[in-house]
Image (cartoon, helix red, strand yellow):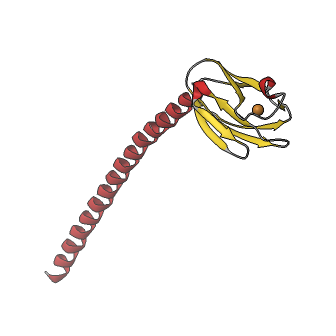
Amino acid sequence: MKVKMKWTVIAALMIVAVMALSACGNNNKDNNSTTNTNTPSNNSASSNDSSTNAAGGETKEITIDASNWKFDQTEIKANKGDTIKLTLKNSQGVHGISIEDLGVDIKGGETKEFTVNDAGTFEFHCSVQCGQGHNDMSGKIIVE
Ligand SMILES: [Cu+2]
C-alpha cells in the first residue's frame, strides 16, 4: 500500500509539474506576444518621430561673424520646421542682429534659438548704430 501511495504521489507531482511547466510556457508565449505587439507600436512611434523630422525639425547651429561693416553670412537657408540656433560673434566693432519678423534681437556673444514654421524670406540687419557702413549690414534667412 505504502509503495503504491508513493507512486501515486510521484505521478501526481509529475502531473502538477508538467502543468506548471506548460502554464509557464503559455505565460512565456503570452509575454512574448505582448512584447511583439509592443515592439511594432514602438517602431511606429519612432517612425512618427522621423516623419516629424522629414517635415523639418532639424536644428541648425549658425554663427554669424560681424565686422565693420559686414556679416560673414548674408544668406541662410532653412527648411520649414527647422530650429535655428543663431549666435552673433563680433570680431570687429559692436553689432547686433535683429530679425523683426521672427522676434529675434541679439547682441554680440548672444545666442537665440528659434523655430521657423513658415516659408518665406526674413531679412535681418544690424541693430546697433555701428558707424558709416551700418545700413549695409543686412542679410536674409530663406525658409523653404
Ligand atoms: Cu550696425
Q: Residue at x 31, y 56 (%)?
A: 22
Ligand 1 is found in the corner quadrant, namely top right
Residue drawn at the location 57% of the way across and 31% of the way down: 103
Question: Image quadrant for the N terminus?
Answer: bottom left
Q: Quadrant of residue 98?
A: top right
Left or right, 42 with reference to 84 = left
Left or right of 88, for residue 52? left
Residue 57 percent coordinates (x, y): 58, 32
- Up/down of 116 relative to 112, above or below: above
Q: Residue at x 40, y 40 (%)?
A: 37
Residue 81 visible in the snapshot: no
Check the image and report above or below for 66 versus 133: below
Q: Residue furthest left?
A: 1
The image quadrant of residue 138 is top right
Q: Nearer the viewer, residue 30 or 109?
A: 109
Q: Nearer the viewer, residue 35 or 116?
A: 116
Answer left or right for 94 relative to 40. Answer: right
Q: Position of residue 89 (x, y in %)?
A: 77, 43
Is residue 86 placed above or below 143 in the rendered structure? below
Quadrant position of the C terminus in the picture? top right
State whether residue 86 appears in this view. Answer: yes
Residue 69: image location, x then y, percent? 85, 31
Location of residue 68 (image quadrant): top right
Q: Position of residue 110 (x, y in %)?
A: 68, 45
Q: Report the residue at 28% width, 62% height from top.
A: 20
Q: Nearer the viewer, residue 90 or 80?
A: 90
Give the left or right position of residue 69, taking residue 104 as reference: right
- Between residue 35 and residue 80, name the one nearer to us: 80
